[in-house]
Amino acid sequence: MEPKEKIILTGDRPTGRLHIGHYVGSLRRRVELQNSGLYDKIFVFEADAQALTDNIENPEKVRQNVIEVALDYLACGLDPAKSTLFIQSQIPELCELSFYYMDLVTVSRLQRNPTVKTEIQMRGFGGESIPVGFFTYPISQAADITAFKATTVPVGEDQEPMLEQCREIVRRFNHIYGDTLVEPNILLPENAACLRLPGTDGKAKMSKSLGNCIYLSDSADEVNRKVKTMFTDPTHLQVSDPGHLEGNTVFTYLDAFCSDEQVARHTAGTYATLQEMKDHYTRGGLGDMKCKRLLMEVLQETLEPIRMRRAVYEKDIPAVYEILKKGCEVAREAAAATMDEVRRAMKINYFDDRALIEEQSRKFAAK
Ligand code: ATP
Ligand code: MG
């Protein structure tokens, strides 16, 4: 269906505090889009029901992290006056939609989803021991997106297969039941380093589940300590040795966080651009510690205002819950309106369909 409005939807699992991978992959972009004034509606949600699919025996973890993620959202500049912040489990229409979408997706299609494959491996769900809810989470994600008629979904690269799956569901639904749902577009970070920020250990993805994160709410000391022990170039033993940038996490983070202006300012003009610094590193003669020092300063510059805003919201937790509660009310209304349209399209709106009742009355009267 041709969208009438420009609508953003995106979210995170409340399985831990948010980290700098979330920030560059999606959060920073959301705040920019929110403040651009170019969108009619912005929905940002905590996927607690999805988090329970692989934490079913650990509900307390999810419960405790709902507030942590809400604090991270507000700290990063998501503004409840401009964005609707809500919690997935409080919107029952999302379960309802997922239930019907399940009929539009095959088991083999889900098995082909590369992100689900990796995540199943990461969680050690061997053989057939995957919880059905976890296996089918791409379907529930399609419900989250389409319930709000989202046109734009700003996420990291790992979400590409989910968006593709969602678009397929929309096309199939509209083909069978008539034009009802809106096909969303993925909005990936423009900067390649931000598509999938690696962990501090150099592993492929910074992820709560892998314990290789710098959290947005880490103290300045914690951030510095984590940067000091970060993975760089294992062949760069002496300062004079030529260094390699490929797979060098410090430089990936600099690419993600550091502008040329910051390089010039923090190195007192030794380098005018990040490229000049990289050239020195690859030539040899530039030590890892100097690069890490720049990264620490740049990260602190980004994280300090976030930390300060978080501290303000931490002082009034009931107000944060109030923001989420109001958000849930707004979100529920939007999802219920879509659900009405879906029921009509799927012909399960028996009581609203006067024509059906009248027609059947005539049919039975004529018997
Ligand atoms: P979990 O381990 O519980 O799955 P996670 O750290 O992978 O947690 P999610 O809540 O699954 O985080 O992801 C939320 C959003 O952040 C998604 O849009 C995802 O693409 C993005 N994201 C997560 N990790 C990264 C990363 N390392 N680089 C870029 N974007 C990321
Ligand atoms: Mg994840």
Image: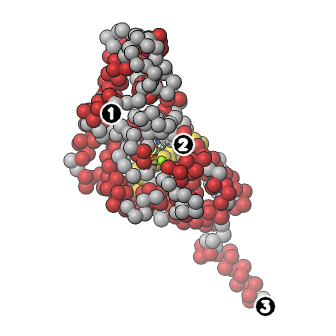
Of the residues tagged 1 and 2, which is closer to the observer? 1
Q: Is mark 2 within 8 Å of ligand 1?
A: yes
Position of residue 54 measured from the top left corner of the image (x, y, whole percent): 46, 58
30 lies above or below 239: below
From the image, tell me which residue sits under label 3: 367
Q: Are marks 1 and 3 in contact (CB under 8 Å)?
A: no
Position of residue 42 measured from the top left corner of the image (x, y, whole percent): 46, 46
Q: Are marks 2 and 3 in contact (CB under 8 Å)?
A: no
Q: Which numbered disc flags the more N-terminal residue, 2 or 3?
A: 2
The residue that appears at 58% across and 50% down in the rendered structure is: 117
* Classed neighbour count for the residue bearing mark 1: other residues with Cα under 10 Å, few (<14), some (14–19), many (≥20): some
* Classed neighbour count for the residue bearing mark 3: other residues with Cα under 10 Å, few (<14), some (14–19), many (≥20): few
Task: Examine the rendering and report whether any part of residue 261 can be seen.
Answer: no
Q: Residue furthest bottom?
A: 367
Give the distance between the C-alpha atoms of the residues marked 1 and 2, in whole angstroms. 24 Å
Position of residue 57 measured from the top left corner of the image (x, y, whole percent): 40, 64
Residue 169 in which image quadrant:
bottom right
Mark drawn on residue 226: 1
From the image, tell me which residue sits under label 2: 158
99 sits to left or right of 86? right
Element on which disc 3 rests: loop
Is 107 or 77 nearer to us in this picture? 107
Give the distance between the C-alpha atoms of the residues marked 1 and 3, in whole angstroms. 80 Å
